[in-house]
Image (tube, coloured by chain):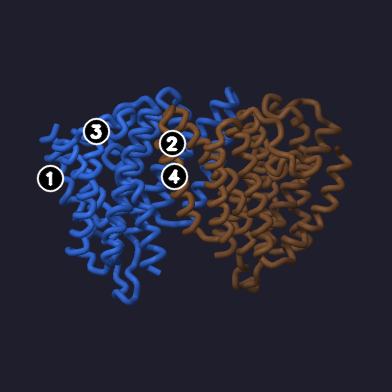
Chain colours: A blue, B brown
């Protein structure tokens, strides 16, 4: 299990760095868009294991929003969101079997659309940010992407080893049985190390306060986002979100800690940095 | 009942025309924002009659999205939507009582946020549209608002009288017992009359095809949106959405036919007219 994970990581990490930092914007959009599409499929397979119509509608609705988000266009995203909430309600109305079940299903669909198809593509918006004039005006959005991914992924690793060597008290056993309080502290230590690494290597423009703020903000949202994905799986009665990456469960299981930090970093960068 | 309705209409319609067509943008934003806020309160009172925490969270989440929408800002709206979906999941995780119930409640919350707080304020965006250069570049967004409201409201009246004098076959008795197939035809006839009226009086720039297209598009979405609001009430086991307007049930009951046409008209105007 650990060996498979390490082998996957050895292939995936250099590929990711190349795509994020040295590649044309469009390839990154394809990468995030594809991950979001697989995530949408996994979410709706978990949410509607027995209802093919709801599952198919959810996947189509999520795919529409993903495409509109990675284009990327605020207007098209708003149009896609408007369209899918109306289409979802109209579908429930047209089926007209059990109104309460139908409305609850629309709600579950909208949650999946927002959680996967809306939140995750914020990485594409982040990647497209231009540096402000005083910093040269170059396409520096990739820095925010790498910063977020490094902090969150460092936290995953720190949490794993912190839990493995010091783990005693369970954090939330009914949601995620493997997680420990000690692992949480390991994750925070690694979050800070990851943020300092990013400032040192490629993101000198960050202040010390921002480094600490992102370590804590991204780190907390990464850990809470991870727990929320586990909660969704338990709520829907699923074990893994899918089987696409060897040794890693589904794509949602892999990226769960990346979803929540994306809007935090994007809107911070957009409003306080790139204006 | 009919007399109360007519009296309310006699006060409300001139006031509406004044606010929509002759008033500063900000007053219109306040009007739509207030209606959306009351609508949000009504939705969550219906959706969570017994759970005060979920109801309070839904109202706060909806209010945040309404404010971000009427500011109006695409960026802030995206931020508010991202924030509420994460906060909703985190709330369910923190309560950690019945995970399935919690996740379903987040879904119901997101449906309400999108249905009321996101869709309705598209009227504010519509109102803010500038005419294209070739038509003078003036602030002509009010025309789209009046066009949409006139077509939808004409349809409500046409449906009422069509059903009253010719109504025989029930349309969807399990969702909305009063509606008839004949009323639907009356509504469509009134939709076309309303659209022609708008073109003649203040919207000469519309082509004949657009007049017919808006009559059918807005009219259909108005009627389907009305049925969807009835479906939500039945699904949640409520009778009226609220009691704020004398003789008219709640605000949601009054504006149900206005919600769905808003995004259709806004995005059409935005992409095909005001570019």
Q: Secondary structure at mark 1?
A: helix
Nearest to the observer: residue A273 or residue A51: A273
Category of crowding for the residue at label 4, using alpha-carbon neighbours closer than 10 angstroms: few (below 14), some (14–19), many (at least 20) = some
Badge 1 and badge 2 in a common chain: no
Q: Is residue B171 visible?
A: yes
| For residue B114, side relative to residue A163 (left or right) | right
Between tags 1 and 2, which lies in front? 2
Quadrant for the N terminus of chain B in the image: top right
In this rendering, is residue A152 above or below B270? Answer: above
Q: Please tell me which residue is depicted at 26% across the width and 57% down the height of the picture.
A: A147
Sequence order check, earlier mark of 2 and 4? 4
- Per the image, the residue denoted by label 3 is A169
**Residue A10: image tag:** 1
Mark 3 nearby-residue class (10 Å; few <14, some 14–19, many ≥20): few
Locate residue B79: give its quadrant. Answer: bottom left
What residue occupies the far front of the structure in this picture? A169
Of badges 2 and 3, nearer the viewer stands 3
For residue A136, above or below residue B257: below
**How far separated are the C-alphas under marks 1 and 4?**
35 Å
- To which residue does mark 2 refer? B92
Chain of the residue displaying label 2: B
Q: Nearer the viewer, residue B268 or A211?
A: A211
């Amino acid at each position: 299990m650990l060996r498979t994970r390490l082998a996957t990581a050895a292939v995936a990490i250099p590929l990711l760095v190349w795509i994020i930092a040295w590649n044309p914007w469009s390839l990154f959009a394809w990468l995030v868009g594809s991950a979001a599409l697989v995530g949408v499929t996994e979410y709706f397979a978990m949410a509607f294991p027995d209802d093919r119509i709801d599952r198919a509608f959810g996947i189509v609705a999520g795919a529409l929003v993903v495409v509109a988000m990675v284009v990327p266009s605020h207007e098209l995203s708003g149009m896609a969101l408007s369209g899918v909430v109306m289409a979802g309600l109209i579908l429930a109305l047209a089926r007209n079997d059990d109104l309460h079940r139908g409305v609850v299903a629309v709600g579950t669909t909208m949650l999946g659309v927002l959680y996967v198809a809306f939140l995750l593509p914020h990485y594409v918006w982040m990647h497209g940010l231009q540096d402000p004039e005083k910093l040269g005006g170059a396409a520096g959005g990739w820095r925010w992407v790498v910063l977020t991914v490094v902090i969150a992924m460092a936290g995953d690793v720190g949490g794993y080893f912190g839990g493995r060597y010091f783990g005693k008290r369970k954090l939330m056993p009914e949601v995620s049985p493997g997680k420990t309080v000690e692992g949480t502290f390991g994750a925070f230590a690694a979050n800070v190390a990851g943020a300092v690494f990013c400032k040192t290597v490629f993101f000198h423009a960050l202040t010390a306060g921002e480094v600490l703020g992102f370590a804590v903000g991204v780190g907390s949202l990464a850990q809470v986002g991870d727990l929320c994905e586990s909660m969704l799986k338990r709520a829907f009665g699923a074990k893994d979100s899918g089987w696409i990456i060897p040794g890693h469960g589904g794509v949602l299981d892999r990226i769960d800690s990346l979803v929540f930090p994306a809007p935090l970093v994007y809107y911070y960068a957009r409003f306080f940095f790139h204006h």
